[in-house]
Image: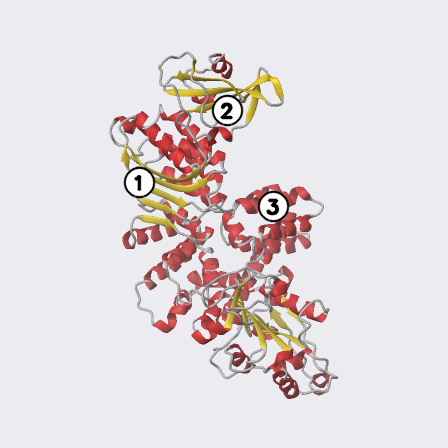
């Protein structure tokens, strides 16, 4: 929940009207969220609970108002339309009651972004939203964020309103929904959940929205293995295109037609034409902020309404005339037609706009000019339009780039978004390399040769930047935003394949869930490290609980042939240090050439780097200790007494041996559970004790050995674990 001070706090549904903002209970609540996130469902839940006595019983009336349908109606007129015709009460009387009992009424106004007209008008609903009427009553409003900005920009209203974000499904909600949908088919449910979790764009931009999740479940259930594989490759909002095509094919299948039939292809083309024509009226509705149409508005396109309803992109509702209308009016009322959701309206509008590019270029240019001036309102429309044809995608991106150079009046700024990240998003939806190159050329001339994956950047935008990266001469890469699997993998591939990239900084040291790159990021880095051209690497992350990622990061660092400067901070699992030291001798040829620094200190030789890395390990691993070692050069074990940190009563003997470059200390200890068994604890002089403390225990010839698998990899000349142990007996 947002307050005037910009703070945020989670809020439970049950506490929606009970949470104080700045010490008081707000009279106005603005529920913000993108299309399909569940705002309308929330409103329906509130009314349902009130009707069934499950909540909101402090109010004598909870009135749900669909703002897309009200036009200029008063509250009394809206309420009157909900009542049976035989209740003899006028709209004026109802209006008077509501305003005379404001504290007893909760107004739920759904869809501010769908409200036609200006908020500064004199219509009753607008006056309520602007807090000029119904000041003592409680009002809850829902809106997409672009329209709620009109309220945020007014200081008085910003202080009055509580801003609440609906974030949609959590991971737990998603798993629960999918599992219930497929019950008892757990295999399909697990496959879909895995697909969603591994696809960053769908996981972040679609899975939280119930409407998209429902689409995915319906398609996944109907698709065979081949089509499931195809849909799993989707990375953009093209999912809704797949959904519409699925609805078309599903409708045709009910007519007992398949793709092998000639008639199937003919009818598919006819439906496509109907969808384009529906898109014409859909676009007109978007401009007027309308989702509901009279059936007669489609009369210019015979058959469109029936086709749209049969496919599922339209719904038709027959009117229920009041008795007075039935008595005195001979002409039947027209049915209303609407889209099941605004996203369908935006998608079909995109199809229509793209069709104009080749059929009526002058009309296309005229409409696009207006759209570019209101990019915040038409974001999804631009996504869907860009995805239709590469020529259209290129044209839209070109328009957006050109608009950056045009001076925009202050009053229009709230409707306009032309920042580079937004243009990247639109280009990404096109999925065309020609579009990607055009945008890359623009960024190369207007921006620095630096790519920043900054805090708060959405996965869709990250993927978009990677999409165009092959056409950009990026020399510096800064990563501050944790990424999911797909973006992490793509970023790692870019790091290792770029011929121009020389500096990489990965800064995300927070110790909390989701505050790091996916493990696949480090795996791909390790696998492709030798291809990297990076000269400067700065890493500040927390991998203390990630042994695999720690090992792979160490491998990446040791395999980089061009690395000249390594700046390391943060915390790492013990496997990072063990892997680094085990690979160090055969790595870093730069050191012998005098071209390598670690944490801003020039490294003269391999031994100095090992000492520096050891000092770093001790500094950043709390509780790490080093043992006192014998400085002799003999390869035979020699007695050196007890080591600091070991309890003397448990220690039988302590030995120090030198194997290759590295001295090793062992402690022979009695096993508390079996006095006949000896426990061997290895501790390396140049490693923090934590590296061994986290090693898994294994058994060898009746002896419990800590860290032997580590040393069998680490010690030079020890071909087998058994041979290594034999040298200490």
Cα separation, mark 1 vs mark 2, equals 37 Å
Q: Residue 412: x, y in percent? A: 38, 71
- Between 454 and 266, the residue placed more toward the observer is 454
If you read the primary sequence from the N terminus, does the residue marked by circle 1 or circle 3 appear first? 3
Indicate whether 668 appears above or below 54: above
Q: Is mark 2 on a helix, strand or loop?
A: loop
Q: Which element is circle 1 on?
A: loop
The local secondary structure at tag 3 comes to helix
The residue most toward the front is: 649
Disc 2 target residue: 707
Q: Tell me the crowding category of disc 2: few under 14, some 14 to 19, or many 20 or more residues within 10 angstroms, Cα based.
A: many
Q: Disc 2 or disc 3, which is closer to the eye?
A: 2
**Pointer 3 local density, CA inside 10 Å: few below 14, some 14–19, many at least 20:** many
Residue neighbourhood size for the residue with mark 1, other residues' Cα within 10 Å, grouped as few (<14), some (14–19), many (≥20): some
Question: Which residue is depicted at the point 45% across and 69% down?
Answer: 149
Is any part of residue 299 visible from this angle? no
- Residue 59 shows in the view: yes
Q: How many marks?
A: 3
The residue that disc 3 covers is 192
Q: In this view, does 650 lie to the left or right of 529?
A: right
**From mark 1 to mark 3, how far is it between C-alphas?**
39 Å
Residue lying furthest right in this view? 86
Question: In 3D space, how far apart are the residues under numbered discs 2 and 3 (Cα atoms)?
Answer: 40 Å
Residue 80 relative to residue 288: left or right: right
Q: Which residue is drawn at 46% across and 62% down?
A: 379
Q: Is residue 536 above or below residue 103?
A: above
Sequence order check: which comes first, mark 1 or mark 2?
A: 1
Tag 1 residue = 502
Name above or below for residue 264 compared with residue 51.
above
- Nearer to me, 359 or 504: 504
Residue 197 point in image, percent of width and height: 55, 46
Q: Looking at the image, which is closer to me, 155 or 657?
A: 657
């Amino acid at each position: 929940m947002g307050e005037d001070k910009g703070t945020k706090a989670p809020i439970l549904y049950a506490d929606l009207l009970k949470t104080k903002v700045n010490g008081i209970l707000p009279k106005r609540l603005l529920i913000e969220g993108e299309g399909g996130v569940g705002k309308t469902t929330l409103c329906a839940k509130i009314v349902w609970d009130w009707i069934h006595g499950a909540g909101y019983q402090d109010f004598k009336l909870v009135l749900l108002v669909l703002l897309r349908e009200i036009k200029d109606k008063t509250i009394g007129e809206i309420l009157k339309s909900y009542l049976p015709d035989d209740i003899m009460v006028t709209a004026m009387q109802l209006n008077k009651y509501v305003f005379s009992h404001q504290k007893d009424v909760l107004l739920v106004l759904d869809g501010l972004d769908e409200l036609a007209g200006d908020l500064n008008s004199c219509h009753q609903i607008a006056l309520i939203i602007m807090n000029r009427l119904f000041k003592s009553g409680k009002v809850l409003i829902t809106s997409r964020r672009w329209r709620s900005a009109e309220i945020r920009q007014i200081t008085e209203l910003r202080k009055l309103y509580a801003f609440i974000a609906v974030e949609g499904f959590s991971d737990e909600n998603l798993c629960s929904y999918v599992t219930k949908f497929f019950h008892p088919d757990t295999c399909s449910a697990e496959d879909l959940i895995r697909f969603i979790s591994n696809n960053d764009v769908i996981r972040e931009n679609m899975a939280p929205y119930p409407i998209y999740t429902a689409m995915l479940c319906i398609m996944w259930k109907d698709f065979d293995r081949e089509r499931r594989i195809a849909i799993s490759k989707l990375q953009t909002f093209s999912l809704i295109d797949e959904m519409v095509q699925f609805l078309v094919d599903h409708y045709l299948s009910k007519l007992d037609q398949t793709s092998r039939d000639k008639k199937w292809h003919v009818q598919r083309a006819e439906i496509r034409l109907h969808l384009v024509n529906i898109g014409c009226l859909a676009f007109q509705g978007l401009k007027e902020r309308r989702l509901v149409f009279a059936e007669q508005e489609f009369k210019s396109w015979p058959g469109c309404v029936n086709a749209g309803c049969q496919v599922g992109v339209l719904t038709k509702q027959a009117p229920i005339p009041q008795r007075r209308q039935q008595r005195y009016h001979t002409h039947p009322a027209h049915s209303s037609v609407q889209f099941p959701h605004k996203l369908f309206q935006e998608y079909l509008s995109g199809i229509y706009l793209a069709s104009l590019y080749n059929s009526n270029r002058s009309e296309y240019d005229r409409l696009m000019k207006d759209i570019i001036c209101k990019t915040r309102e038409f974001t999804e429309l631009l996504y869907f339009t860009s995805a239709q044809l590469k020529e259209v995608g290129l044209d839209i991106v070109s328009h957006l780039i050109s608009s950056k150079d045009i001076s925009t009046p202050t009053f229009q700024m709230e409707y306009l978004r032309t920042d580079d990240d937004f243009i990247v998003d639109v280009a990404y939806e096109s999925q065309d390399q020609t579009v990607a190159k055009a945008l890359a050329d623009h960024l190369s001339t207007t921006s620095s040769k630096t790519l920043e994956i900054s805090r708060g950047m959405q996965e869709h935008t990250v993927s978009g930047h990677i999409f165009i990266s092959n056409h950009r001469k990026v020399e510096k890469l800064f990563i501050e935003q944790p990424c999911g699997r797909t973006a992490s993998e793509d970023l790692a591939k870019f790091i290792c394949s770029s011929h121009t990239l020389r500096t990489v900084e990965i800064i995300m040291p927070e110790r909390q869930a989701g505050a790091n790159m996916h493990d696949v990021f480090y795996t791909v880095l390790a696998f492709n490290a030798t291809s990297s051209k990076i000269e400067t690497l700065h890493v500040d992350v927390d991998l203390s609980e990630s042994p695999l990622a720690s090992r792979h990061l160490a491998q990446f660092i040791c395999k980089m042939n061009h690395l000249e400067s390594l700046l390391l901070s943060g915390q790492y699992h013990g496997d990072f240090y063990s892997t680094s030291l085990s690979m160090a001798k055969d790595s870093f040829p730069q050191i012998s050439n005098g071209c390598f620094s670690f944490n801003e200190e020039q490294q003269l030789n391999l031994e100095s780097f090992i000492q520096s890395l050891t000092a770093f390990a001790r500094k950043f691993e709390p509780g790490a200790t080093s043992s006192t070692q014998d400085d002799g050069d003999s390869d035979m074990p020699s007695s050196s007494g007890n080591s600091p940190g070991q309890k003397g009563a448990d220690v039988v003997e302590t030995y120090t041996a030198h194997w290759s470059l590295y001295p090793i200390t062992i402690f022979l200890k009695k096993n508390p559970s079996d006095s006949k068994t000896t426990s061997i604890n290895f501790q390396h002089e140049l490693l923090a004790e934590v590296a061994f403390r986290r090693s898994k225990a294994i058994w060898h010839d009746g002896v419990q050995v800590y860290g032997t698998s580590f040393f069998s990899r680490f010690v030079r000349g020890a071909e087998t674990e058994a041979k290594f142990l034999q040298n200490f007996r």
